[in-house]
Image (cartoon, rainbow, N blue to C red):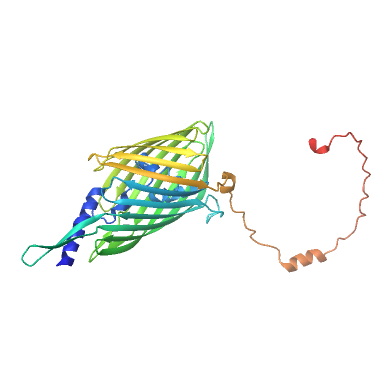
Amino acid sequence: MTRSLLIVLASCFVAGLARAAGPGTTAVPVLQIPMSARAAGMGTSFTAVASDASALFYNPAGLARLNAHELDFSFATGQGETSIQNFAYAGPTPFTGISGNGYTSAGANLLYSRSGTIEVNRLNANGSLGSSESVSAGSDLVLSGGYAERVGMTPLELRDASYQIDHYLGVGGKYVRSTIVTQTGSAVAADMGYLVHSPEAGWSFGASALNIGGKIKYSEEKEPLPATFRGGFAWQGGVPSVHNVIASVDGDYLLDEREWHANMGLEYFWVKTYGVRLGYQIHREDAGLTMGFGLRWKGRFLLDYAWGLGKSLSDQHRITVSYRFGGVPPSQRGRQRRPFIESIPERDQLRGIEDKQPEFNEPAPRPRAVPRERNTGVPGWIY
């Protein structure tokens, strides 16, 4: 009886989590909760913007846009008794990549959430209360990894200007281990992303497929992970040394729930130090306004905060602390693979060339006399 009661409570708890994250039939709803404070402040409109360690959540191809190593720690509040922490790393690699076009990067992520406790009451045979205890409602552990590189470049010539369009491709995978009361399940899933960006025009487009192919089994039946397709546009402009502006429009579609969402975001930074963000989410149960701010100190230490207000008036807060180090200049990031020599002369051919003598020998030219320069007292390297 006790085991049946726990299973019923677990089912009710899973249904409650799914309803909190959005209507649907998928498991592990923590995968739908945005962790990055920067992305959350922009209303999660981040598919075409992704340029930090949180790219694994939105578009793995964005990892290729990092020019420095980055360590992130994020945590979220406002999810009831659920506590969520996330550790992330991303940074460039010294390789030219599979396609040989440079801008290679790798990233890893560890997410852990705990869902608080629930009361379990045991009844006696006569219907009276026998005992009561608090048990863990559940927890989730998500391990992710990804790789991205530039796969090509397209020159675009117009009447007044010329542009270069960079194409990035990223892949990732994740391992999910989820526990609900006494039931534990695990699953693996894949991620894929594409991003195209024009540095001169400031425009970018991104598309990604997340949590693909994974199903988790708690007791008898398997439940799918929240497979999500994302796409969006972004524009970046301004004077880099004074102010920088990013505007983005984004959308996502949950495959199993057959539900779509739309997002808009805006970010403004002044003198690369002080930033503010605004966002708005559309067609969500808890849709509404998001806002946040960012602080940068010496380009190394970063602090981002985001706050969201949904229809249920339940405040949601995100905080991300980051450290960047080991910057790599773009000239080195964009280094391409040198072409291989297709063929070399055989040894016998080289030997034949060495043995072949000329039909006649000309006398070696005599060295010409070099006139001495007058000493002017000025070193020649000055000129």
Give the residue at x 32% y 57%.
140
Quadrant assignment for the C terminus: top right
Give the residue at x 31% y 46%.
77
| Residue 234 in view | yes
Quadrant assignment for the N terminus: bottom left
**Where residue 248 appears, x then y in whole percent?**
39, 38
| Residue 22 in view | no
In the displayed structure, 140 sits above or below 161; it is below
In the displayed structure, 91 sits above or below 155; it is below
The answer to which quarter of the image holds residue 173 is: bottom left
Q: Residue furthest left?
A: 126
The answer to which quarter of the image holds residue 288 is: top left
Residue sitting nearer the eye, 161 or 194: 194
How many callouts does the rendering have? 0
Residue sitting nearer the eye, 268 or 204: 268
Q: Residue furthest bottom?
A: 348
Give the residue at x 28% y 47%.
79
In this rendering, would 200 be left or right of 235? right
**Where residue 314 appears, x then y in whole percent?**
25, 41
**Where residue 112 appears, x then y in whole percent?**
35, 55
**Where residue 365 appears, x then y in whole percent?**
92, 51
In this rendering, would 335 be left or right of 272? right
